[in-house]
Amino acid sequence: MMFAGFDTSNYTTSAALYDGERIYQQKKPLEVKAGERGLRQSEALFQHTVNIPSVIRALAGEITSAGDIKAIGVSSKPRNLEGSYMPCFLAGVSAASAAASMLGVPLYETSHQVGHILAALYSADRLDLIDRPFISFHISGGTTEALLVTPDNADIIKAEIIAESSDLKAGQAIDRTGVLLGLCFPCGGELDKLARESSAEFKIKPSIKGFNCSLSGVENKVKKMLSSGESKRDIAKYAISYIRASLDEMTERLIEKYGDLPILFAGGVSCNSEIRSKMVQKYGALFAAPEFSCDNAAGTAVFARLKFEREKGS
């Protein structure tokens, strides 16, 4: 049996197939002009609409027969919260709805955030955690949140925000730093590589209020360092070190409140090598492989299988 998934986030068109063991996926990044720091929703929606057919064709070779697909999952909104909405997800919903109607199979809608969490759990070989509470960080261009994740009958998992950035998001801080340094957007991979060339060490006191962090100071400091003529590699190292220190302090405070729950990191920023190594070493945190950390449709395909099996067994 195969289960299909679609995700049309702000910067990646993706589709995936899941056979219960292995995930096959195809992605196509959206194009952002040099020097720009993002896309308007109308442009993202247009590019997704153009990309979806080629992404699906690239996956077609993994299907022996259309009858192999038993259900389809799709991300239809950023979070499972009332009022959560972004137009770019309409492209994925449209394609998934058409495919489900054509095949006569169930269509299951979830959120982009749940998709990220399930993809990370799959990659870390810890899908068993859907049956118990854990803490998941979702850190990306649009989100820097710590979530208390608990089992949910209807939605598989429920993600409650228990900490977040009060202003700039981690991915925004990384991308704005990268653009200032002349890197290509999105800048995460290039900034990580640049930072690894630096031997500088920074004594950082993150701005934390309660459980929430503030990251707006990163951009201001980066601009000052750049105007002072400091090296690009040291500036990159500072930006990433500040974000890592903020996540570290948030994690410590959350463990004090919620106890020694498993810690999972999902979202594109969790690909960063410094964040990954420090959080694994200190907390035994779980991380996905990079292809399951960045935006992807793997989690929606996993969601389709879990929903299908749950309904079949009820």
Image (tube, rainbow, N blue to C red):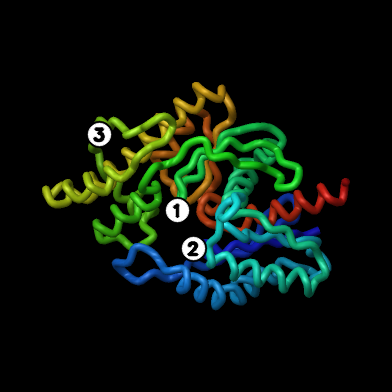
In the image, farthest residue toward the front:
83
Q: Quadrant of the N terminus?
A: bottom right
> Which residue is at the front of the view, 245 or 113?
113
> What residue is drawn where x is 66% and y is 72%?
95
Residue pointed to by mark 3? 201
- Residue 158, percent from left and from top: 65, 42
Looking at the rendering, which quadrant does residue 31 occupy? bottom left
Please give the residue where the numbered disc 1 appears in the rendered image. 142
Q: CA distance from mark 1 to mark 3?
A: 28 Å
Q: Position of residue 301 (x, y in %)?
A: 69, 56
- Marks 1 and 2: CB-CB under 8 Å? yes
Instruction: Tell me if mark 1 has few (under 14), some (14-19) or many (20+) residues whose alpha carbon lies within 10 angstroms of its own.
Output: some
Residue 288 visible here: yes
Q: Is residue 51 above or below residue 169?
A: below
Query: Callout 3 environment at 10 Å: few (<14), some (14 to 19), or many (20+)?
Result: few
Q: Amino acid at mark 1?
A: Gly
Q: Amino acid at mark 2?
A: Asn
Comparing marks 3 and 2, which lies closer to the viewer? 2
Say what amino acid the circle numbered 3 marks: Glu
Q: Residue 299's x, y, as percent?
A: 64, 52
Ranked by sequence position, the earlier of labels 1 and 3 is: 1
Query: Pointers 1 and 3 in contact (CB under 8 A)?
Result: no
Whether residue 79 is situated above or below residue 213 in the rendered picture: below
Which residue is disc 2 drawn over? 10
How much space separates mark 3 and mark 2, taking CA atoms? 34 Å
Q: Residue at x 52, y 72 (%)?
A: 45
From the viewer's side, name the closer residue of 262 and 216. 216
Lower sequence index among marks 1 and 2: 2
**In screen coordinates, is 283 left or right of 81?**
left
Q: Secondary structure at mark 3?
A: loop
- Residue drawn at x 33%, y 52% is 191
